Amino acid sequence: MINLKINGIPAEVEEGTTVLNAAKSVGVKIPTLCYHPDLTPFASCGMCICKQEGNKKIIRACSTPASEGMSVITNDAELFQVRKTILEMTLSTHPASCLTCIRNGNCELQTLAAEFGIREIPYAPNVSDAPIDDSTPSIVLDPEKCIKCGRCVQVCQELQGVYALEFVGRGDKTTMSPAASLRLNDSPCVKCGQCVVHCPVGAIHEKDQTDEFRMAVADPSKHVVVQMAPATRVGISEEFDLPAGTVSTGKLYASLRALGCDTVFDTNFGADLTIMEEGSEFVKRLTTEGSVLPQFTSCCPSWVDYCEKYYPELNENLSSAKSPMMMQGAITKTYYAQASKIDPKDIYSVAIMPCTAKKFERGRDDNMKSSGYDDVDLVLTTRELGRLMRSQGIDLKEMHEEEADNPIGEYTGAGTIFGVTGGVMEAAVRTAYHLVTGEELDKVEVNAVRGMESIRKGEVDIKGTKVRVALVHGLANAKPICEEVLEAKRAGKPAPYDFIEVMACRGGCIAGGGQPYGTTDETRAKRIEGLYEDDEHSALRKSHENPYIQKIYGDYLEEPLSHKAHKLLHTTYEKRPIYKA
Amino acid sequence: MSENKENFSPELMEYIKEWKEKPGNVIMVLHKVQGEFGYVSREAAEQVSEMIDVPFAKIWGVLTFYHFFKLTKPGDINIQVCLGTACYLKGGETLVDEIQNQLGIGIGEVTPDGRYSLEAVRCIGCCGLAPVMTVGGEVFGKVTKKKVAGILASVPAQ
């Protein structure tokens, strides 16, 4: 342990702790701007500078490890002045368009400017005139607002291993952009939106489509059907200042009706359906000689995009099952349309997702039009839903609880944990056990697959059959696993795993690129706990036990992997270039 | 795995192989590529990326950080105008304006026929002769606006 003093307060911290975190441990907050707890300190902004007693060297608290006997001064008149100057200079490169900015009221720079009482900017404006890049269906780059903190580049490279963004150019002409002046849509970008949730300002944001929703619900000819993702029910709570981890399913159903949706379904039903298809596919691969193994999960559109670009040789390993959102969309415009005698052309299918990549997924290829129409017409992120609700005067806290509509609104606990790293695997195991043995698991929790380690490997015992599994979250961690699988494949060796789950975002969808700002490992843990509790409190916890799942197979889909199921619920993959020409 | 799509010379290919695993290889290799082609095209940078297994974005970051690296093919005759302190004070910028006037190209541009390209440089080591420009590698000192046209005409393409 290291002993030091922060403003005279004794602190004892583990070796390797930064001065910033040492100060935090004794209740002293040092202002930061570029720092983010998910990332290696980059020390680009200088806001966290501190002095040391008996040492003239000025340090940056975020990147300086605490050392024995150190005595740190975090605040005095001079430090305040320097920090204020840094802010003023940053603001001189930033447009003063706060009132019309997507981050208005939720911007780290705006907050600092307020805290420091900045009333004027003594420097001549020097705002970038680099053009906006709105080439992807998911993410908008607005370099005018960029403060060059570098978080997005770090996220894209370190956490996600995608390398779409890089510092291009130098000095005040630097932009965070793809190589070779390419637009984001022509770059390796997988639309995960982790750059969005890590951006402290409005320089990278989701493509806002709330107006499209308003137009749809105002159109009397449209029958608006909405679905909401597992992670949205836990994420939305923070948009309304409820404690992280609060699950607001019933209140959300009521809110969506209050917003004008005609029918409210739940993506969790789609998740149960995914388990039936993906689980059956897995059991088939596992029990059929010569099948391609391991099977990779395919619910995460960013992971699928990454695989198609970086590891096309593994496309055949991706489960052909569509994601829960796309399955739900397909059966909305077929099964539900038939059952309710509504012409599918009049149905407007909306999905509320924790994810920016889902905006891209809905139009990724013609498989996403299996009903003959766009299976999903509009995807809104959890943040967009929060804005929509606030603009309509809907306060989640004050809402009553309602139920989802049937026949595709009921879900099991297996569907809800899809939003958590390890959740898809766990849900699949609960059903695969039944499919293989004809029996039910006594204990549904599969602890071997739970946890927050970036790469987890384990074995799941299905009555004597050992299924070798791996779980990956944070897309950069997919690389070593893909390499391992590919190496065995090329060498003609047996596959090192049977089933692999990949989620692009750290912690799973609960920390997706469309979730509320300010996500840290602390909030991740709480949201994960919230969804596991939702599962625990569910009367049914296995997808195949969902009576409406049994009904849809009985009435419509026949059986998992049937011809009809294939047409509506499965997709294909293709090799895609990392960079478009 | 990595094909030689950009027709790197055998010597360059050998050099890249030699540097593949060494730290600091990006700049060394890009130097060599520019030495061979006079600039580093996007395609050449992508081939380097594949050969040394460094993401293309990282390579592009390096290429755009250092002024030394050129991303477009220079003209047959490259013109450098010094805008270092001494030359700047002695009117280096008026030379840039006059070249623009004569050839229709600004800094970083190439004439449509590919004959001339223009770049600004910082100090070429003969401040006593400010303002200085080089044309096709030949140094001209104490240049005035009036002398520019004659100087341009005097240098044949290599």
Image (tube, coloured by chain):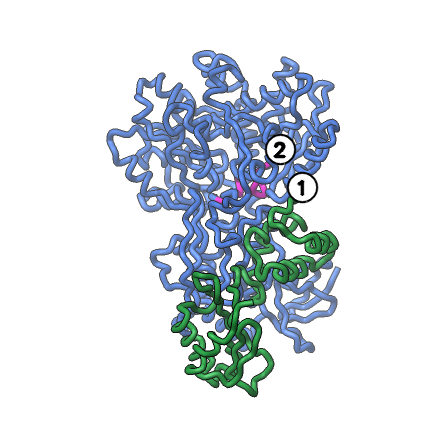
Which residue is the site of mark 2?
A: A313
Find residue A332 and report its horizontal and vertical position in percent: 39, 24
Amino acid type shown at disc 1:
Met
- SS at circle 2: helix
Q: Please tell me which residue is depicted at 45% across the width and 16% down the height of the picture.
A: A552
Going 70% across and 67% down the picture, which residue do you hit?
Answer: A4
**The one of A574 and B42 positioned closer to us in this rendering:** B42
Q: Which residue is mark 1?
A: B1
Q: Is residue A176 left or right of residue A473?
A: left
Q: Which mark is residue A263?
A: none
Percent of width and height locating residue A391 = 32, 46
| Quadrant where the image shows the N terminus of chain A | bottom right
Q: Does residue A68 belong to the magenta stretch?
A: no
Q: Is residue B75 above or below residue A356?
A: below
Q: Residue A95 falls in which quadrant of the image?
A: bottom left
Residue A240 shows in this picture: no
Q: Which residues are magenta?
A: A501-513
Per the rendering, the colour in which chain A appears is blue
The residue nearer to you, when weighing A402 against A266, is A266
B123 relative to B98 in the view: left or right = right
Mark 1 belongs to which subunit?
B
Rendered hue of chain B is: green
Structural crowding at the residue carrying mark 1, measured as other residues with C-alpha within 10 Å and reported as few (<14), some (14–19) or many (≥20): few
User: Measured from the top left, where is residue B77 in percent x and y?
Assistant: 52, 68
Q: Are marks 2 and 1 in contact (CB under 8 Å)?
A: no
Amino acid on which disc 2 is placed: Glu
